[in-house]
Amino acid sequence: MNDILPGESLTWQYVEGCFRSVVKSFGYQEIRFPVLEQTQLFKRSIGEVTDIVEKEMYSFDDRNGDNLSLRPEGTAGCVRAADQHGLLYNQQQRLWYQGPMFRHERPQKGRYRQFHQFGVEAFGMPGPDIDVEVLQLAHQLWLKLGLLPHVQLEINNIGSSEDRKRYAAALTAFLEQHEASLDEDAKRRMHSNPMRVLDSKNPQVQEILADAPALADYVSDDSVEHYQQLQALLRGLGIEFRENPRLVRGLDYYNNCVYEWTTEALGAQGAVCGGGRYDGLVAQLGGRDTVAAGFAIGIERLVLMLESLDLVPEQARRAIDVYLIMVGDNLTAQGLALAAQLRQALPDAGIVSHCGGGKYNSQVKKAFNAGARLAVILERRDSGSEAVQHLRLRRLDSDDEAITVELAEVVDKVREMLAAS
Ligand code: AMP
């Protein structure tokens, strides 16, 4: 599991803020559901003969003897929760979620055993309009983050579940003819999930597969029409894509159009977002027949991309805008009150009030180290028998001289100076 340190967390917050603003602008609503579910939920939805269920889930028996798993993805839990609470009954829903997912994979850069996803799921709309809306939403996020030039959309049509059943039967028949030359993995999968044999890394198996029946020949006319309409809509919106007939995705619940946004900026772990339609899943999990579509984005991969491409705006890199310096005796109460006043007036600014006393120079040094843009300096100096109080503002991101301000105008002046930098 990778730790997220404060610097990375600023990028994370920035990504999250952008995602939240995009889903809000598309009218999607948040749904939350647990990280632990019955293992059976994932087996029934993702599929028994998939890498996730066969090798990657963190599963255990709880004290009641129920077998539970940490969620490896969000769609199954989202469907379970939405259906259980009546959100899918005869209605359309546009939902989003975010949170940790768990897969026991070999960790490497961009691949972790605990990672996080943003996901959107749209229910009750047969498409292709909703499919394109969901893709448009991801496209909007790339645009907002400045990632659009660094991602490519790949799409494929994997047909309806009936189409795939017919194809799977044809593929099994083909593989049976070549059984003697297959490896153990392929032999095991050719009856339980023959399409997974297509992913084999074994060159000998791949050689045999060169003559295997093609999925495209088994896809029904309805599905082809859906796919063509979807492509026409994408073209109309200027959303670029590439067809990839090898894209099948490792989860069983998908049908018709599936897709992935990939990048070359991350090395081996190039997938940043994956999704598609899953029209049969709600009914399969016991709900009323409800068509659906959605995707999930890997948050860590977005954070890595933004940092390696240096795309995080200066403003988002800054946790602290204003550092309040207090020089002189008995200023703490007044300083804390001033900080409170600034926070109330400037709710989006980071305002740190210096703690621990010390000389002006050491406090200013702390303000620089904190990355603040502006120092508010509250000073009390003895002048003869009277103590005189000053309030000054000093820009820390330029060589400008500090300016003296009145207490009554400090909030407006701080706002003005922050806006100007
Ligand atoms: P998937 O459900 O496998 O299509 O995953 C959707 C997205 O989650 C991928 O495109 C990745 O960005 C991200 N993702 C999947 N697995 C991992 C992992 N082990 N570590 C980090 N990100 C991941």
Image (cartoon, rainbow, N blue to C red):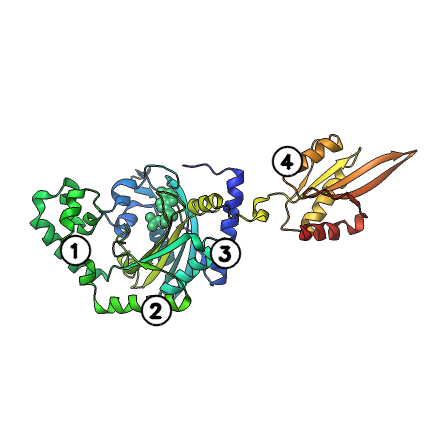
Task: Please name the residue that numbered disc 3 is placed on.
Answer: 144
Amino acid identity at mark 2: Ala
- Does the CB distance between marks 1 and 4 fall below 8 Å? no
Pick the residue in front: 365 or 18: 365
CB at disc 4 and ligand 1 closer than 8 Å: no
- Does the CB distance between marks 2 and 4 fall below 8 Å? no
First reached walking from the N terminus: tag 3 or tag 2 = 3
Spatial distance from mark 3 to mark 2, Cα to Cα?
A: 24 Å
Residue 369 horizontal/vertical position (percent): 64, 35
Amino acid identity at mark 3: Lys
Up the image or down, 416 lies above or below 88; here it is above
Where is the N terminus found, in terms of image quarters?
A: top left
First reached walking from the N terminus: tag 1 or tag 3 = 3
Residue 335 horizontal/vertical position (percent): 74, 40
Task: Please name the residue that numbered disc 4 is placed on.
Answer: 369
Residue 381: numbered disc: none
- Counting labels gives 4
Task: Please name the residue that numbered disc 2 is placed on.
Answer: 232
Residue 361 horizontal/vertical position (percent): 73, 32
Q: Residues within 10 Å of mark 1 (few under 14, many from 20)?
A: many
Amino acid identity at mark 1: Ala
- Does the CB distance between marks 1 and 2 fall below 8 Å? no
- Kindly report which numbered mark, 1 or 4, lies closer to the viewer in this rendering: 4
